[in-house]
Image (cartoon, helix red, strand yellow):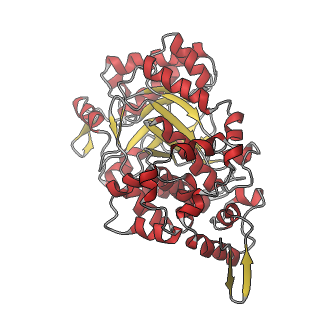
Amino acid sequence: MQLGVTIRGSTYRFGSVKEVLAKANPPKSGDDLAAISAASAVERVAARAVLSELTLAALRAAPVVPYEEDELTRLVEDTLDEQAYAAVKDLSVGQFREWLLEDKTTGPVIRSVAAGLTPEMAAAASKLMSNLDLMVVGSKCEVVVRANNTLGLPGRLSSRVQPNHPTDDVQGILYSAREGLSYGCGDAVIGVNPATDTAESTTEILKALDQVTRKHGVPTQNCVLSHVTVQMRALDLGAPMGLMFQSLSGSEAGNKAFGISIALMDEAWDKMKRLGATRGPNVMYFETGQGSALSSAAHHGADQVTLEARCYGFARRYKPFLVNTVVGFIGPEYLENGPQITRAALEDHFMGKLLGLPMGCDACFTYHASMSQDELESLKMLLGAAGCTYLMSLPVGDDIMLNYQSSSFHDIPSVQRVLRKRPAPEFDAWLARMGIWDGDKPGERFGDPEVVG
């Protein structure tokens, strides 16, 4: 395998495919922190030149974490669709990129090979793409999923209402949820990040949210983002759980830091299908983010884009309703500024969609990152244009519990109107019935939380 190239009389040689992937990556503070990034712009170009000539078969043969050491690698390898893989395996990464961008390569064509792609293949393609390339391909990849409503249809952009409260005060959570619904948000999920990670608190919040959505016939799903084992106990307590949640990492060691494994997630998925309150068939919700494995020293010397793609290789086992990259939440140690956060969001959306997942994004940043409000608003528009399945929504875009900046209740209808997109069809019809929305403009009850009081 050729892992070297000469540029302007200087020869650059790389010791492994993993090193090529890392050094071909666009600049990321996390890769700098891990001491695996390219030493110069020219070395980055050299790595990309080498990567462009590697075949997808060569990437399959060289996962960034060895088969013997990692259950996620084994999961991907042992479940790969061989027929789909055979259709693309002889393409170089450069040829694969060109194929994805061709007009004749439509969304259904891409979906036909998705099950034959490893995460490393998706990550490799992203490293040869511009931001616009990532948007073009991402917008082609329509992934339609169903729970109590339908997400991912053409011309749709959904949102999660995030009614967090620093003390899990149920009435505070409900008021925030009602406000979000009154602005036309929440068709993806009403999802609460709990301050108290107990089965009893999880159950109490889910019951309260379920009462509101049932009373007003809101076609959506509820979720409390406690640990998956806590949610399993909540199901035993009779919690009306719309979606089951868990954060994922891109390596077995990273998932151990989260307290999960494939066996545990298999058990949780089975329990949710039996005891959950959603019609389905898609009943799981996962969150990810570049840098999660590095933050727990579980990255195996691999770059954060490739490890993020491996999260998606794990997630697709469970046919989820939602997958959300919380792109700027982990902090500037991993994504330092607006350009890096923007790039990561578009990479993650592209890779997840390419691998067959219904990708959403929390376009966000922590307060010690170097990103402006204008950059964040621009990112929301880019994601919406790229076909992102859903965005976050919370009061004034400022999470009072998690202390970071995200999307506001007002942002979602603004992005939808500019891009001429609508919420999920069932939710769209409900908004019209409630007077929250009137055709293509706000209705009489828009912004009035008493409409769902």
Q: Quadrant of residue 325?
A: top right
* Observer-nearest of 95 and 232: 95
- Residue 65 against residue 296 in the figure, above or below: below
* Residue visible at 52% across and 49% down in the picture: 363
* Observer-nearest of 68 and 438: 68
Residue that protrudes farthest toward the top in the picture: 237
Tell me where residue 134 appears, x and y as whole percent. Answer: 47, 62
* Residue visible at 65% across and 31% down in the picture: 260
Q: Quadrant of residue 451?
A: top left
- Residue 404 against residue 239 in the figure, above or below: below
| Badge count | 0
Tell me where residue 348 appears, x and y as whole percent. Answer: 53, 53
Q: Quadrant of residue 146?
A: top left
* Residue visible at 42% across and 53% down in the picture: 84
Tell me where residue 274 appears, x and y as whole percent. Answer: 44, 18
Res. 71 visible in picture: yes
Tell me where residue 424 appears, x and y as whole percent. Answer: 31, 39
| Left or right relative to 35: residue 303 | left
- Residue 113 against residue 431 in the figure, above or below: below
* Residue visible at 38% across and 56% down in the picture: 110
* Observer-nearest of 164 and 18: 18
- Residue 219 against residue 326 in the figure, above or below: above
